[in-house]
Image: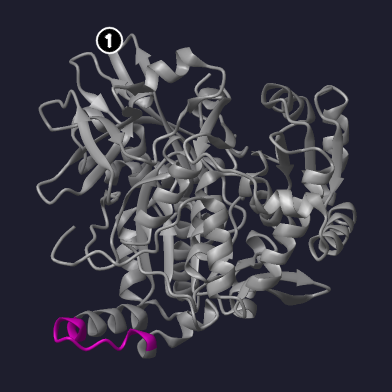
Amino acid sequence: MGNYELYESRHIVDLRDMFESSCAMFSERTAFLSKVDGTYRPTLYREFWRDICSLGTMFVKEGFTGKKIAVVGEACYEWALTYAAVVSGLGVIVPIDKELPAEEIANLLCIAEAEAVVSTPKSEEKIRTAVQSAPCVKRIINTADELHALIKKGAELADSTDEAAKAFKELPIDCEKMAVLLFTSGTTGVAKGVMLSHKNICTNLEAMTQMLYIYKEDVFLSVLPIHHTYECTCGYLCPIYRGSTVAYSEGLRRILKNMEETKATMMLAVPLLVENIYKNLWKQAEKTGQAKKLRKAIALSNFLLKLGIDKRKKLFASIHQKFGGHFRMFVAGAAAIDPNVSRGFRELGINVFQGYGMTECAPIGALNRDRFFRDDSIGLPLPGVEIRIDSPDSEGNGEICLKGGNVMIGYYKNEEATAQVLRDGWLYTGDVGHIDEDGFVYLTGRKKNVIVTKNGKNVFPEEIETYLNRILYVSESLITGRFDSREDDVVIAAQIIIDKDAVAEKLGATYEDDALHELIQGEIDKLNISLPAYKRVTEFSIRTEAFHKTTTQKIKRHLENK
């Protein structure tokens, strides 16, 4: 863990213990900020615990003890409250992606055998359609009115000697049993139900906060889909565990405005989002003629930092104001981030720390520390987590394997799939990487995505895509391998989505296709010079349609490679 001691973390027995103790310790602090009628309204920790007990009481009253309850919709207080009430001993929470079609939601509800669904108003119509094909569901609860009516009624019962209120507070919790059922398709298209226990999630919360210090004054701006375990564990449960505030964003287009309104200090993000924000900062600087001045300021700042003098907040005050004036940290996950972007943000006084994990490990397995990090690494193993490389090649790259209390129970009703990834207590992640002498883990790519040339060389498309995405005129890219009979070998092909603004700036608004092709070809030629021959991009196409993506913005390669 470097030359620094781990931060202290509070031990929690289970998630109910976490919610109850946090709400007692931080009772008068703000737990949530929600936009209501154009203004952010606070919910205090003591109010949160009151609502947990009230809703939990009504769930007991209505016979849902020991049952599975699904929750579908955008990130909001009611979603978080439903999750908290269900995992506080009542039963199993089943978060479902609101973007799925109704027929797929119905399929997941049936697999999970969910008896109730809590839905936000935006998802209610889809849920009512889905439930027609899911006879296991006995009740749909709308968060706009029905849920609040239950909370109000439950509050009245909780203040009385009602048996349901007493029963909820005394519900037993087995920390080793399934508390959360998460369906994950990743980028493969095959949905599997990941079974997570209280132990899995609680050990993850304790471990991650030993590596990155989270202040109770921190405000997390929630922008990622909350059904995904990355946002749920790290962007909801973690701040509640630490006594911080969760503020719900109104959407990607209003991130900067919401940062200012909520005085946000932290945000979980996928690399694509962080990289685009960074790219846009520089595009704006170039457009306004400030780029040269900014580069000089960075050079001066870096020199002063070597002398132990930090003037970044002052030198780059205008940039910090764009982020609301209080922002201090991005935590990037779900894919590898371009290290140039992490370094670039840090030079401006905003930290970017990268972590690594998957739903199957609740979700964090490795994380960069705030005082010991590598921008090109996915981090160090969390306390209590072991990481090893299986069958490393001559360069030390092999499959990343994890062991620890955060590793899932298994896949729900799928022993065959469980046996494929859980062996002798080790989780075989399907990711390829290596570990350096300091213990930092480096991600090379997905095992199933590797392109193998005729002479046995491995090309990881994720690496080439990172290089392509650094090109000013490229917004996104996808690398595939194609056998070329003329070459008698696999050639590297790229699908590219252009940055229309950057291209128009260079070629003019009415550019011809030939000019665009020549511009991109020239940039790829420059890139190829720096790459070994077997990694060079041989052909490319300009794509006009967006890539098919997961809700964490990973490209669904199984669809795009067809």
Residue interval drawn in magenta: 303-313
Vertical arrangement, residue 476 with respect to residue 26, above or below: above
**Quarter holding residue 434:** top left
Residue at 44%, 87% in the rendered image: 317
- Give the residue at x 75% y 70%: 35
Tell whether position 449 is magenta.
Answer: no
* Image coords of residue 155 (percent x, y): 82, 63
Is 543 left or right of 77, judged from the image as shown? Answer: left
Question: Viewer-proximal residue, 398 or 85?
Answer: 85
Q: Position of residue 519 (x, y in %)?
A: 42, 47
The residue pinned by badge 1 equals 488
Specify whether 547 is left or right of 121.
Answer: left
Q: Mark 1 falls on what kind of element?
A: loop
Which residue is rendered at x = 50% and y = 48% of the image? 230
Q: Is residue 380 left or right of residue 100?
A: left
Residue at position x 36%, y 88% in the image: 315
